[in-house]
Amino acid sequence: MEFGMVFVTLAIVFGLYMTWGVGANDVANAMGTSVGSGAITIRNAIIIAGIFEFSGAFLAGGHVTGTIRKGIIDASMMPSPEILVFGMLAALLAAGIWLMVASYYGWPVSTTHTIVGSLIGFGLVGLGAEAVEWRKVASIVASWVVSPILGATLAFLLAQSVRKLILDTEEPFRNAKRYGPVYVFFMGVLIALVTLFKGLTHLDLELTQWQTVGIALAVGLVVAAAGKVLLDRVRVDAEADRDFHFASVEKVFAPLCVFTACSMAFAHGSNDVANGIGPLAAVVTAVKTNQVTQESSLPLWILALGGGGIVLGLVTMGYRVMRTIGTKITELTPSRGFCAELAAAATVVIASRLGLPVSTTHIIVGAVLGVGLARGVAAIDLRVVLGIVTSWLVTLPIGAALAAFFFFFFKGLFL
């Protein structure tokens, strides 16, 4: 209680730093394919993502969160509130530093795995190895394989369907407008399910499984109807087709990329904002109550801070990871970018229903690989892929090591 205001101030600063890292790294996953495919500019991507990420974080980010994110450590094992405070401050600072480094080099790493690694480091040195839920850690490690494989498989199949139904036909533009509404329908259904499963989980909507499916189908039909109206307005650009045979076809897919990006950004903001502000809320609650609780409240000012930090990170450094996702792994066009986003949304829905421990970051990287593989291995820059996979492997241990160091630092400083 003696240093209560100091702890809260540090938590606010570190929480803003961590959410800045979320914006700089994770948000680019939602927008990278749209930017890389040329569907939208980086400037417009930043504006769109800023609006929808902040809206998702502020409107649907929830009112409470678990004291320890993802249940990696049992909060009941905390011997005192100050140990919890030191651990949360260490986790926020460690995660923020690693996300800054990864974003600087353009490595798309999972912010969830970053904060989990930091919590593991705190748990090991602050509470002991028995305090860490190792089975959950093992499931997270398994997601390094599950997530990209699922995303790549679905993206590959979607890219092949576009090739067979549209690109390899005698009238690709006509078929693009014919099958476009069908793709839009599935996109609407999947994005609605992603929003209901991931984006609105904190609003306590009491929906049955059939109600959820019914809403998603209704959204799909509405979006398909709206999409048909938009697609009917697209005209053949003969001049552009001279330079690139499928230029007019790609114009059909460009607006679809924007819609998927907006929806994924909203779902991401609402679901992952707690990675940055959850530890902040835990510190505020511990200082306020002088005890360790299983859940921490998320008042509006904390949600606003989290949303603001995400937007700030996106504006200042998000372009680096966008460039990696959108241009460095493989060459993207609007149709390929759409397939990658649609595959990512489908994978999130499937994983959510099956309870699979997947990472959105790993899914979208896998999806981009999938659309690249549809054109052959030569279409993928394997050096970039190797760098990304390496960054995934070191995220947990680096987060843990940094958090362990900062935990001892704060403990020595204040005790």
Image (cartoon, rainbow, N blue to C red):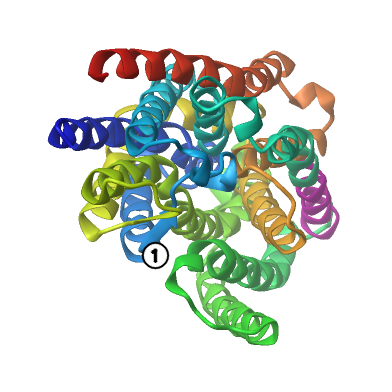
Q: Position of residue 377 (x, y in %)?
A: 83, 25
Tell me the chief SS of the magenta region: helix
Would residue 81 appear left or right of 328 to someone viewing this image? left
- Residue positioned 38% across, 30% down in the render: 83
Q: Reply yes or no: does residue 7 show up in magenta.
A: no
* Label 1: which secondary element: helix
Badge 1: residue crowd in 10 Å (few <14, some 14–19, many ≥20): many
Q: Which residue is mark 1?
A: 60
Q: Position of residue 108 (x, y in %)?
A: 55, 29
- Residue positioned 65% across, 35% down in the render: 365
Nearer to the camera, 60 or 123: 123
User: Type of residue at label 1?
Assistant: Ala
Question: From which residue to which does the magenta span run?
Answer: 152-167
Q: Position of residue 352 (x, y in %)?
A: 68, 59
Nearer to the camera, 157 or 278: 278
The answer to whether any part of residue 34 appears in the image is no
Q: Reply yes or no: does residue 154 show up in magenta.
A: yes
* Vertical comparison of 95 with 285: above or below: above
Nearer to the camera, 179 or 128: 128
